[in-house]
Amino acid sequence: MSKLYFIVGSQDLYGEECLKQVAADAAEMTAFFNEKLGDIVTVELLPTVEDSPTCIANMRKAQCDDDCVGVITWMHTFSPAKMWIKGLQELRKPLLHLHTQANEKLPYDKIDMDFMNLNQAAHGDREYGFIVARMGIPHEVIAGFYKHDRVVSEMKRFARVANAIAFSRNLKVASFGNNMREVAVTDGDRVESQIRYGWECNYFALGSVVAKIDAVTEAEIDAQMAEYESKYTMNTDNVAAVREQAKYEVGIKKFLDENGIGAFADTFQDLYGLRQLPGIAAQDLMGQGIGFGPEGDYKTSALSAVLMKMAEGLPGATGFIEDYTYDLTEGQELELASHMLEVPPSFAASKPMIEVHPLGIGNKEDPARLVFDGVTGDGIQVTMVDMGDRFRIICADIELVKQPEPMPNLPVARIMYRHKPDFATGTSEWIKAGGAHHSVVSTALTRADIELFARLTGTELVVIG
Ligand code: MN
């Protein structure tokens, strides 16, 4: 279980009694946080910061603890912020400044100077907030009484985003084949991807994956087929084509596991040694939280893995999709989004069908794939593009809708959505911002989640909605 450290600020000016009360209040708050955030992270209290050495020791502990995904800070009393400078310089993990109080209401009839000195976050958090701003540390500020539902829900968001950033910092992304020839938007600066997000993006020869695939046994294929049959409905007589995909999945999974890889990109332009483009194999892997990008799109692959991690435990679907074609009926414009095969099964409105159909692209055998109609509900569409000197994330509000009519001849899974605030604005702003045709759609995450991720990773963000 990942962990957030809670660090409370004070100083030694107010006497032992005051510091004892600060520690007692902090312990009570920590117990409350564990009760409320326990399904996402645990919260551990560190010694109250009364001086610079304590602050440095606390931040070093947080930075060196591999289970720690971030730090919560709060100034119970005034806490002169020069004491925090060297400690904050040790920290390179997501920082939450919780602007709260131990008490909800003011005790109007009893309040005296002792109470004021003990409970002065309005004063101390401004001093601390200044130094965080002055040092240019990307951080989140959540304001309000810590027991209020809104504050708890914002703290949960911070915990989920911090978890996703920790996952991102350790993510290995494999490219089996290069970026699709001549395609611009899927390409990007892999060195900057590693510096900014931690993604280790490396090329692996497809042949080394094919070697794994060729070594898959009939028994392993049987086991994978049994899994397919438990999750999906067979809607084909061409069992051999499905078994071929089952073999790919087992082989690719072994390769990913052995190399600690959490996201991969392939390309139909390099299928040397494979008889089909991975279809259901890629789809079922996405269903297990593995990031995927087609046509060598390593950015979308990594981003999809990170956002699936962020959405863990939330209701709704998150995954890769490609913008495809429109219904431009005036006033009711809709988009049909899909891919040539690889649509994640998390988007399925009902049990997916396993089908085998020809694929005009890639000159290979007919690949097996999952076919289904998509889920509905409010969502977001997120993409990342490389602007040359920086990455940009674009996040648009969309509404996923039921397809108005059946599409019996469309041999791929699909989702449909309405752009917000309307078709013309949603699509034209996306295009002006350089938004890609590959993206991650989520009905689990919200714009606020992406805003926080962008802020904490120092990424430029364009929002549309
Ligand atoms: Mn594509």
Image (cartoon, rainbow, N blue to C red):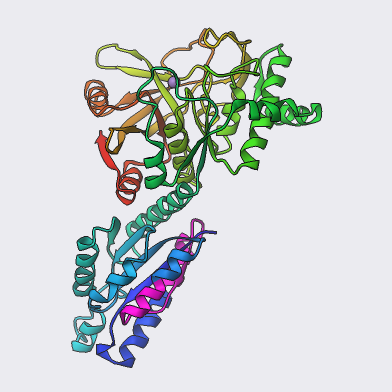
Residue 147, image quadrant: bottom left
Q: Nearer the viewer, residue 98 or 241?
A: 241
Q: Is residue 255 above or below residue 207?
A: below
Pinpoint residue 247: horizontal percent, then vertical percent. Answer: 70, 25
**Is residue 73 at least partly visible in the picture?**
yes
In this picture, residue 37 sits left or right of residue 465: right
Name the foreground residue: 357 vs 276: 276
Is 251 magenta? The answer is: no
Residue 367 at what x, y percent from top left? 62, 15
* Direction from residue 450 to residue 217 in the image, left or right: right
Residue 380 % position (x, y): 36, 34
The residue positioned 33% from the left and 86% from the top of the image is 19
Would you place residue 335 above or below residue 138 in this image?
Answer: above
Where is the N terminus found, in terms of image quarters?
bottom right
Q: Please, is residue 15 above or below residue 193 in the view? A: below
Q: Quadrant of the C terminus?
A: top left
Dividing the picture into quadrants, the one containing residue 278 is: top right
Question: Quarter containing ligand 1?
Answer: top left
Residue 105, compared with residue 358, is above or below; it is: below
Q: Residue at 73% of width from left, 25% of height from top?
A: 214
Which region shows up in magenta? 29-58
**Left or right: 80, with 168 as reference point:** left
Give me the residue at 30% from left, 12% from top. Answer: 328
Please say whether residue 230 is visible from this viewpoint.
no
Q: Is residue 56 magenta?
A: yes
Kindly identify the residue that appears in the image at 38 percent across and 46 percent down.
195
230 sits left or right of 163 in the view = right
